[in-house]
Image (tube, helix red, strand yellow):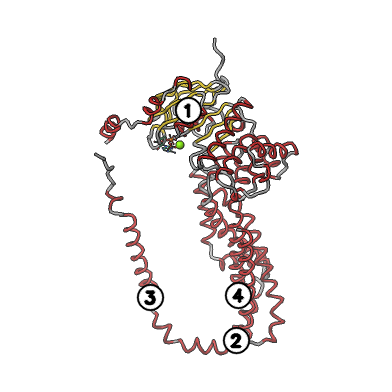
Amino acid sequence: MTEQPLIEFNHVSKIYKNGTVGLKDINLTIPQGEFLVVVGLSGAGKSTLLRTINRMHDITSGDILIEGQSIIHLQGKKLRQLRRSIGMIFQNFNLVKRSSVQRNVLSGRIGYYGTWRSILGLFSKEDKQKAAHALKRVGLAEKLYTRADQLSGGQQQRVAIARAFMQDPKIILADEPIASLDPLTTESVMNDLKKLNEEFNMTVIVNLHSVPLAQKYADRIIGLRAGELVYDQPIANVTDADLAAIYEQPKVVQLADRVVAS
Amino acid sequence: MNVIPKQRFVQKYHLKALGGLLLFILLIWWSARVTEVDFGLFFVNFDQFLALLQKMSHPDWQYLSLVIAPLVETIKMALIGTSIGTLLAIPFSVLAARNIINNDFARGLIRLILNLIRTLPDLMLAALFVAIVGIGSLAGVLTLAVFSFGMIAKLFYEAIETIDDGPLEALQAAGATKMQMIHFAVLPQVFNHFISYFLYTFEINVRASTVLGYLGAGGIGVYLQRSLSQFAYDQTAVIILGILAVVLVIDGISNTLRERLL
Ligand SMILES: Nc1ncnc2c1ncn2[C@@H]1O[C@H](COP(=O)(O)OP(=O)(O)OP(=O)(O)O)[C@@H](O)[C@H]1O
Ligand SMILES: [Mg+2]
């Protein structure tokens, strides 16, 4: 018997309410500690795939297991506990711009607090220190009391990484974390994610549009097209031609789809 | 060849917008007819208006010392009424906001209640409260509280609906409860709007409470009504200038606060 994978997709499909197919019969296993990069054209279903893992999206059929437990029916407290064990990084950073950096980072911890304690601002001393430490890790120690909207995009994304770090997550989901950043900042954000993966053995799943970055950072690359898993290889086997093929417009197929649809 | 998706007939000719415009014009025409608006009358009796203005142009400054106390009472009434209304409005505005409450039915019900409350004319409310609690400023406070509640709840939920939903999503993904999401992601984004809407309503209430005085609901309105019924227009002028001063001060505070906070 092989070791139990951390995340397991069994025949997962997702159809949006308006009939759009988000995911189509996905079978996928992700081992603990992997740095997985998801590539695919816009609309291929990358964001959808990521958001099914922390149940920000519900699936239509199939099952998703994390550490052997099905997560698709979790509710209430159990669901919140699942979510706090999974950090999420967004393309638009999603910080509360009018709040301080410290408050933003601490908010990554609120899954561990009761509603009233957190609302009264009663964060423990350890957590405040942890927040300072998390910021130091991403090179923003001196920005603790700065308002988030006074930071550059790259700095905001690194604050978001610090926020995710506060969750003590097993898994980090990053949905095009560098899409709105310049090349230099891109490098440091990707390095921050890689460090979480290497130092804390966190499983990191990143959606990327950049093939060179995928090749540089990934342990394994999977490709989606129109909601289907069309590619899945460890980095050692990945060739440029493979990746080019994922990004190729399947013209004939598309045209055929249109004819059928209309 | 590109296949351009077909627009529906309604979309193609902007039927919705055109229909709306037509309806609007019809409504105006119809209201003018039904209400028998006759602008000529306004000009025929214009000299009476001028005569009144002339009488008011010599304010009786001696009267000022008598007016101060009821003016302060009016401010107090407005402040307490606005505060009570606002405190009650906050939870309702959260429940009425589309991006917080997904349940269409629950939200619709809350909005229906709010619409009902806004429909009640404040003069009717004042008459009602005077009947219940007797003549005096308590009736005024209660009227203003109900009026502020309806108005503030609407302004607040519209403000909540304009926020950036990104931070809400981020906190939900971190395992936050609804209350935590509201406190950490919604409040910081709407706080300034809340302050300025509060002051705006406060200002309206100061003016509204002058009318309430007619019904015995306390404050400066009682004096205004007396001076008018005695044709003591020199006193009326003092009262109006007093109210103007108060409104200007509130407006000044409101502007300064907004500049500081934004
Ligand atoms: N809330 C939604 N309702 C309906 N359809 C949706 C919704 N979200 C996404 N879709 C559709 O599902 C498909 C997959 O979308 P998804 O956002 O997962 O793509 P993606 O690979 O992340 O694209 P991108 O690279 O542009 O971010 C698309 O066709 C999209 O239009
Ligand atoms: Mg996406």
- Disc 1 residue type (three-letter): Gln
Q: Chain of mark 4?
A: B
Select label 1 or label 4 by which is in front.
1
Q: For ligand 1, give the image quadrant.
A: top left
Query: Disc 3 is attached to a residue of which chain?
Result: B
Q: CA distance from mark 3 to mark 1?
A: 77 Å
Read off the residue under disc 4.
B214
Q: Nearer the viewer, mark 2 or mark 1?
A: 1
Going by the picture, which residue comes out furthest to the right?
A125
Tell me where residue A149 appears, x and y as whole percent.
59, 50
Kindly identify the amino acid type of the residue bearing the numbered disc 3: Glu
Q: Looking at the image, is B127 positioned above or below residue A250?
A: below
Residue marked by disc 2? B233
Q: CA distance from mark 1 to mark 4?
A: 79 Å
Q: Dot 1, crowdedness within 10 Å: few (<14), some or many (≥20)?
A: some
10 Å crowding of disc 2: few (<14), some (14-19), many (20+)? many
Residue at the spot 53% in from the left edge and 50% down from the top edge: B163
Vertical comparison of B229 with A218: above or below: below
Q: Which mark is residue B36?
A: 3
Foreground disc of the pair 2, 3: 2
Would you identify the image quadrant in which residue B191 lies? bottom right
Q: How many neighbours does mark 4 have within 10 angstroms: few (below 14), some (14-19), or many (20 or more)?
A: many
- Give whichever of B7, A218 is nearer the camera: A218
Residue A145 seen: yes
To the question of a shared chain for discs 3 and 4, the answer is yes
